[in-house]
Amino acid sequence: MSKEYSIYFDKRKVVLTKSVEAYFSNNIGLFTRYNTPHELSKIIEFFKTTTQVQNVFISGSDLKTALRDFKGLFHLIEASGGLVQNSKGEYLFIYRYGKWDLPKGKLEPDEKIENAATREVSEETGISNLQLGEKITSTFHTYKIGTVTILKETHWYRMLYDGTEKLVPQQAEDISIAKWVSKNELEEILNNTYDTIREVLSKTGVI
């Protein structure tokens, strides 16, 4: 199991960790722990309304329980996607809403996470016959729909592609570009992407 979970609130984040003390020397923010879900709720409400606090590091009884308690505070949406590598060693990225991203999308009712990952990549980029690899990680970020704060949990998988199909960005999902990117071209991506995507690339050793 992971030693921590980072949940992104735009450019701010909440880190659920086994020990907040490990973050004292290299981080600025609020360091705290909780004992009950009600206490956690109070901490998160404070964080959401106090924008001067950039990061909050929280420990609880154990990480599994802390993540469960945290999810219980939000409306949860699950998604799945992939880091796709082709036979040239290039990685597949999409451009949507003014930022570079990895292909992903919401799970359909009763759909398996793995099936959703390959389906969404195919739909958003136009390629098929993807070889599903190991799970990389799950990332978490929040956004608002009206007054409701949504927590999105995205499950990421390694994928391999050995075909020659033309990339077709899914315009219905506001994707304007789908392209293969080599490692030495990643700077452009990293300068204009999300923290969750950097997390996926970091955990796979791409960056």
Image (cartoon, rainbow, N blue to C red):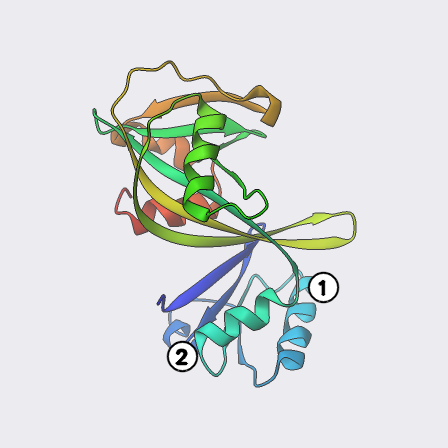
Q: Earlier in the sequence, mark 1 or mark 2?
A: 2
The furthest residue to the right:
147
Q: Which residue is mark 1?
A: 49
Which amino acid is tagged 2? Glu
Q: Nearer the viewer, residue 4 or 152?
A: 152
Q: Which residue is mark 2?
A: 21
Residue 174 coordinates in the image, percent (x, y):
60, 25
Q: Toward which corner of the image does residue 17 lie, by quadrant?
A: bottom left
Q: Nearer the viewer, residue 117 or 190?
A: 117
Q: Which mark is residue 31?
A: none
Left or right of residue 37: residue 57: left
Label 1 SS: helix
Label 2 SS: helix
Distance in Å between CA atoms under marks 1 and 2: 25 Å
Is residue 133 in view from this perspective? yes
Which amino acid is tagged 1? Thr
